[in-house]
Amino acid sequence: MVKQAVIYCRFSPRPDAEACDSNLGQEARCRAYCKLRGYYIVDCLPEFAVTGGKLRRPQLDIAMKLLQPGMVLVVDRNDRLARDMLVALTIHHEVEQLGCTIEFADGSPLRNTPEGKLFSNLLS
């Protein structure tokens, strides 16, 4: 059975926005990641102008509602998911409670090992 994925991208513009990575770049890397792993993409949800320090975000909330057991939430990098450790831990916990996982297109380790949890927490 083909694994299903929901892609989540977040772009929060700053004064130096041209130096920031756009949702288009994030989406392209996430789509390439899914293709490489043979994942079927259910939806791609770009978030615009929302800080990663907030837990509740419109597109992230939709992504969470789309997730069904066994699915994966694909995010470009850890800092695109959250910019606050408590927020990141809460999102990871909610996704795990749904029977799903979070994978990062940049190849960051999964949280299913002690090392992966440490790495994720350090980045948060």
Image (tube, helix red, strand yellow):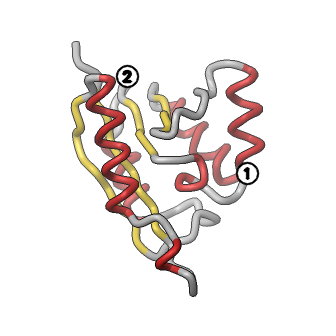
**Left or right side of 63 for 121:** right
- How packed is label 1: few (under 14 Cα within 10 Å), some, or many (20 or more)? some
User: Percent x, y for residue 10?
Assistant: 45, 62
Q: Residue at (50%, 38%) from the top-left corner? A: 104
User: Percent x, y for residue 14?
Assistant: 56, 81
Query: At numbered mark 1, what does the secondary structure look like: helix, strand or loop?
Result: helix
Q: Earlier in the sequence, mark 2 or mark 1?
A: 2
The label on residue 108 is: none
Against 54, residue 35 (above or below) is: above
Amino acid bearing label 2: Gly
Residue hosting label 1 = 85
Q: Quadrant of residue 1?
A: top left
Q: Residue at (23%, 18%) from the top-left corner? A: 2
**Left or right side of 37 for 100:** right
Q: Residue at (58%, 34%) from the top-left corner? A: 108
Residue hosting label 2 = 70
Query: At numbered mark 2, what does the secondary structure look like: helix, strand or loop?
Result: loop
Amino acid bearing label 1: Met
User: Percent x, y for residue 24?
Assistant: 32, 61
